Image (cartoon, grey):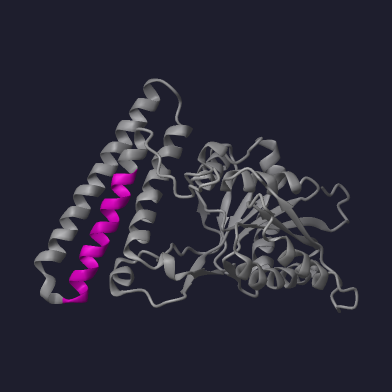
Amino acid sequence: MTTDPTAPRLLTIAVLTFRRPRDLDAVLPLLVEQARGVRALGVEARVLVVDNDAGGSGRERVEAAALAAADPTHADGPVSVDYVVEATPGIASARNRALVESGESDLLVFIDDDERPSEPWLAALLALQAETGAAAVVGPVRSEYEVEPEPFIVEGRFFVRRRLATGTPVDVAATNNLLLDLAAVRRRGLAFDVALGQVGGEDTLFTRSLVAGGGTILWCAEAVVTDVVPAARVTRRWVVQRAYSSGNGWSLTSVMLSARGASRLVTRLRLSVKGGVRVAGGLGRYAVGTVTRPLGRRALGQRARGIRTMARGAGMVAGAWGAAYREYGRGDA
């Protein structure tokens, strides 16, 4: 990490992967260009690929990208692209490996391998962090689809994400577009909980813990990344399971953050009530959409959003009592 105030700040751009060679081919050149682009801000960046496939299936793709990025004749200079294998299955283990491998860095930014950064992405994240000293900065994700989603998914708004003004504080963030001040992370001794490695929600727990420890997470509206949604995820089954998983992860992490004993029981009961209210509200909305079916897509939206709300509520109730949905479950785990 940098101790000389006149030296460039050191940044690691971490991308986690598991058997997605085409995504690596697409995203790595973009990340290299992002790294070159922030040198004018006094930041020296490198790209780190953490492969969660014990067989190292991404090595050849990354080595090819590293060779191209190391071109000394490039006008903006070479960029280091590093590759490590994290053999322990689970997204939390892979994220922790990125933290370990960033031991010499001042900053760490996470982006998913199936995302594509916009041109101002990294510079916008860095500028807001430098201006405010925030412990973390998070940016928006918009979706593009390999196949056009059916009306049920569109009207249900399953891929609609929050939009906030730049500088808005948030109390939780995903790690698919997140810049971390590693000094703030190290001071609090934070790491991703491996108990959630196959379940998901490890980023929810991490960022909620960061805020609970006094850190600030700010929203940066200009730091947009695009999520390329494969056809396998544009199905009713997948989006409803994701809604359930979202509610499940929120309750699981809420219980983990609560004190043991009576306080934890109160948390479980509170989450159960909130989840039950969602289930009831979603059922009511679904009923309205069923009764008004002749209204077409408007009624379809009522039914779809009702199912989404019911699924999230059911996930909350299950998570309140420790039933975890293994969103990232794998046969090698």
* Residue 38 appears in view: no
Q: Is residue 256 above or below residue 230?
A: above
- By secondary structure, the bulk of the magenta-drawn segment is best described as helix
Does 129 sit left or right of 331 as displayed? right
Does 309 sit left or right of 146 as displayed? left
* Residue projecting furthest to the top: 261
* Residue 130 appears in view: yes
The number of discs equals 0
Q: Is 301 contained in the magenta span?
A: yes
Q: Which residues are magenta?
A: 296-315
Q: Position of residue 21 (x, y in %)?
A: 63, 66
In this view, the residue in front, 317 or 218, is: 317
Q: Position of residue 222 (x, y in %)?
A: 58, 69
Q: Residue at x 37, y 60 (%)?
A: 238
Q: Quadrant of the C terminus?
A: top right
Q: Is 327 contained in the magenta span?
A: no
Q: Residue at x 30, y 40 (%)?
A: 317
Q: Residue at x 68, y 43 (%)?
A: 184
